[in-house]
Amino acid sequence: MSIIKAEGIYKTYNETHVPVNALNGVDLQIEQGEFTAIVGPSGSGKTTLLNIIGGLDLPSKGNIFIEQTNLKDLSSKQLIDFRLHHIGFVFQAYNLIPVLTAKENTEFIMVLQKRPKKEREEKVKELLEAVGIGDKANHRPGQLSGGQQQRVAVARALASQPKYIIADEPTANLDSKSTHELLDLMADMNKKYQTTFIFATHDQRVMDKARRIVTLDDGKITSDETFDR
């Protein structure tokens, strides 16, 4: 079943001055449970596409459906609420709240979702154990390595029970060992929870792990390959 369907997506910046066409007619469907990397050179449009898939930006032209919902039809407030309940995010810079512990950072989205305290506590414990840092629950980000902070970010993304997770260059600030551990972790979470992962990346190590690679160049899809991994 397709959970994401992009139809004729165009994105133009600075439309009133010198227009920059970031996306030029992208059509893409992503199925439940995929582990997909969107790749291409700098300026190819991959981050723009990821932001549109994540509801962080809207296309200048075309439609982006998440199941039956067209994100273009939502108001700003509805879009914020939709992201909160349906989409998880893992960023290059981790984006953890410095004054909160690993447990509190993981729980934060569930607090915004107004989920019961007991449910939050049980889910946080499960997720921090699943990502391998259950013993670091009371550590703040400054007390954690980069790899450990990114594990907290993955746990936080999963905590909202999203339809899918988008990850923008999630390995860019990690060493080789932490990168391999993180990718193995994400692959395990993909299989355990059937959560769809969509990456924008330059990292060959991410591409080697992905089961589908969508290549962009000049805002257009130039190849779309699947792999048995």
Image (cartoon, helix red, strand yellow):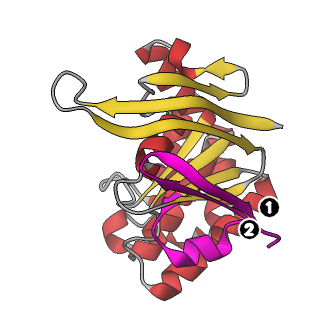
Say which of 176 and 39 sits in front.
39
Q: Most extreme residue toward the bottom, as rendered? A: 177
Give percent across and percent down for residue 184.
66, 75
Is residue 87 visible to the viewer in this orientation of the structure?
Answer: yes
Residue 191 marker: 1
Q: Secondary structure at mark 2?
A: helix
Q: Position of residue 176 (x, y in %)?
A: 48, 86
Q: Residue 23 placed where, x, y %?
A: 44, 39
Q: Is residue 196 magenta?
A: no
* Amino acid, disc 2: Asp
Residue at label 2?
188
Residue at 34% from the left image edge and 31% from the top image edge: 12
Q: Amino acid at mark 1?
A: Lys
Q: Quadrant of residue 210?
A: bottom right
Q: Is residue 109 above or below residue 143?
A: above
CB-based contact (under 8 Å), mark 2 and mark 1: yes
Residue lying at 41% horizontally and 24% vertically, measured from the top left: 60
Is residue 217 placed above or below 135 in the rendered structure?
A: above
Which span is picked out in magenta? 200-229
Residue 209 colored in magenta in the image: yes
> Percent position (x, y) of residue 18?
18, 32
Q: Quadrant of the N terminus?
A: top right
Q: CA distance from mark 2 to mark 1?
A: 5 Å
Q: Which mark is residue 113?
A: none
Tell me which residue sits at (59%, 79%) in the image: 181
Residue reaching furthest to the left: 17
* Quadrant position of residue 66: top right
Label 1, secondary structure: give it. helix
